[in-house]
Amino acid sequence: MLETFKSRKTIALDCTITLPACWVGADELEDALRRSHASPHDSGVYSILVEFPTKCKVMVDAAIRLLSLINQLDHCAKRVRLAFEEGEAGTMGYLNRMGFFDNLSRNIEVLPDWPSISGKRRYGGRNASLVEIERIKRDHRDGTLLTRLTDSLMSTCGDRQDASDLKGAAWTILAELIDNVFSHSRTPLDGYAALQPYSGGGHVRVAVSDSGLGIMETLRPALKSEFPKLAVLSDLELLVEVFRQGVSRHGPDRGCGLKGSAAKAIKFKADLDVRMPTNRVKLVPAHGMYQVNTAYCHDKLPLIWGTHLCFKISLKT
Amino acid sequence: MLQNIVEDMTTANTTIDAQPPDVPMSETLELKAFMKGSSQGWGRDQGRAIYGDLLTLVENKSGTLVFFVSLTGIERMDISFASESVVELARRFRGSKAFALTDIADADMIENLEAAAARKHQPLVIRFDGSTRLIGLQPSKGNIEAFQFARSHRTVRAAQFAAANNMPIANASMKFKQLWEQGFLLRRESVAESGGVEFLYFRIG
């Protein structure tokens, strides 16, 4: 299998994204994207290879961000191949169980091969602790989606004293973020949501990803008329205000959803990672709020359509 | 942030039958009946759909001034849903009808209602855990005493507050008028002892 993997790797490709042989969250995925010699969305790139080496373990935020990117590239008629060095015994099996391949375009080539059976169909619903990627379809709102996502949290964190608060916070965060996708993303491509507790790392990742216009693209045109004072802010400063005071293109009555979600997440000392088409902002709470001086911004990143958010909620007391 | 005004609810009116003649007509409605079988209030679209149904019902109850909205059977409600449904309804009828929320599932739901009400500068009376609270917009410092005075009476006139606090009636009237305009109180026109027009103010919930 290893030989096959290596031999395929020698084929000339326009863009190769090699994930590291360790836990891969959004940070590691972004590093891998930066290391690739071309941006996968570049007009001259027609073929993309994503490599998953042995010991590579993809976390939910990276999984749905990658899933969105791959489906975007397929939508642009680019050839995309995913190469799993360990085959189904490794991270491919884990991704299969969480429904990654059920949501992947069938045009994508998978090496050594597509999973023989859908993991979601095989395991789905049998084990409450099994995390599944949930599809956000704009034309069909599944009323049980939020409960499915948050129930998996209780199988791991149900014994905590603050379990009820944690579940309530996770439910509201997901409800608001997903509703935002329904309301704002304006895309034919589906969005994705996932929640996964990582007991070893002492945190829960709550991630929502869409392939729409991006939060700044929808917000900035409305700033001049609705919030002229905010129009001069940088993306980083504006994003802090979106989550601190609530800013919506629909005017001052709106915007309370993202603000309220952030307030709930901050109670659990949650970092917030927001990936926009070509930049990324990480917000770290200080003194009970997100602030500009504790935010980190990365510019000029390889293009990924849409908005991709991940709250990293601390489970440490 | 539930630091808001907390009161004993033992004197609160609850049913149509128990009300004295000068207390506004009240009625209880079950939000669950508008939820099309769902026990979760999720998102702006669902909130708006329910707002439309609630609006029709409230407009058809011209004699009822206070609606107790029971949240029995509602397990969760996000901020956007709360904003577009019950909070928007309270804002729409501010000054003419009022809404008090009862049978709330937990503190998490109160937090979401509070965030939605604060955003729309709408005061909202809720009953939770045996007490009545005001969430959302709070009375200004200058009006808090008048508000608390009004909350301690079923009905009250500005003249009563003026006499109790040794202040000009015009001053007391202004405070009560502001509280009414902002949605903290209801009022009805009445005849003063002098024969002139005077407003009778009612607490909500």
Image (tube, coloured by chain):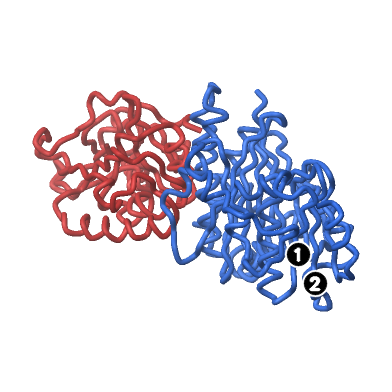
Chain colours: A blue, B red
Which residue occupies 58% across, 49% down?
Answer: A119
Residue type for callout 2: Ser
Write down the chain letter for disc 1: A
Percent coordinates x, y for residue A301 in the rendering: 82, 61
Q: Is residue B191 above or below residue A267?
A: below
Percent coordinates x, y for residue A59 in the rendering: 70, 44
Residue nearest the observer in this picture, B194 or A309: A309
Write down the chain letter for disc 2: A
Q: Which image quarter: residue B131?
A: top left
Question: Mark 1–mark 2 contact, CB under 8 Å?
Answer: yes
Secondary structure found at label 1: strand
Mark 2 lies on residue: A47
Residue A81 disc label: 1
Crowding around mark 1 (Cα neighbors within 10 Å: few <14, some 14 to 19, many 20+) is: some
A139 sits left or right of B149 in the view: right
Residue type for callout 1: Arg
The residues tagged by marks 1 and 2 sit, at their Cα atoms, a distance apart of 8 Å
Residue nearest the observer in this picture, A87 or A208: A87
Q: Which image quarter: residue A43?
A: bottom right
Residue A315 disc label: none
Question: Which mark is first along the chain, 2 or 1?
Answer: 2
Q: Which image quarter: residue A211?
A: bottom right
Secondary structure found at label 2: strand
A224 sits left or right of A38 in the view: left
